[in-house]
Image (cartoon, helix red, strand yellow):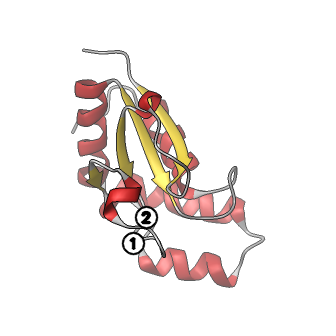
Amino acid sequence: MRDMAYRVKRVYDDAESTDGYRVLVDRLWPRGVTKERAALAEWAKDAAPSTELRQWFHQHPGEFTEFSRRYRAELDANPQAVAPLRQLASEHGTITLLHSVREDTDNHARLLADYLGSHPDFLA
């Protein structure tokens, strides 16, 4: 098994050779981005927060701690959504999780990267 690394990047930023395998982890396609510009290998919609949770967070933008708790609970309840990402990491080494949100630190892609990194044996 390869060493696995999860990077996080905005889909609007230029692709780089160090990105490795690029995966969009948003439920909706980012505005103004073509498939060519995104330069992604996969779109993992199911690993993104549910529509309901995304809408909740838009109504409660200051509640990132609660959003984090709810998103992690969704990931725990939906192992088949993150299993492909773990498999891709074992095959490709570096996975860049792409997101379209403006917030660079408090966002679901960072939570997902942390979640994947904290569950190293998770392959189910």
Residue 111 percent coordinates (x, y): 56, 48
Judge whether 115 appears above or below 17 on screen: below
Q: Tell me the number on the disc at residue 63.
A: none
| Residue at which label 2 appears | 26
Q: Tell me the number on the disc at residue 29.
A: 1
Q: Identify the residue shown where x is 73% and y is 74%.
A: 61
Q: Quadrant of residue 92?
A: top left
Residue 94 percent coordinates (x, y): 39, 28
As drawn, the residue found furthest toward the right would be: 62
Q: Identify the residue shown where x is 35% and y is 50%.
A: 39
Residues tagged 1 and 2 counted as in contact (Cβ below 8 A): yes
Residue 28 percent coordinates (x, y): 40, 74
Q: Quadrant of residue 106?
A: bottom right
Q: CA distance from mark 1 to mark 2?
A: 7 Å
Foreground label between 1 and 2: 1
Residue type of the residue flagged with mark 1: Trp
Q: Is residue 36 left or right of residue 98?
A: left
Q: Nearer the viewer, residue 73 or 31?
A: 31
- Image quadrant for the N terminus? top left
Q: Identify the residue shown where x is 31% and y is 31%.
A: 89
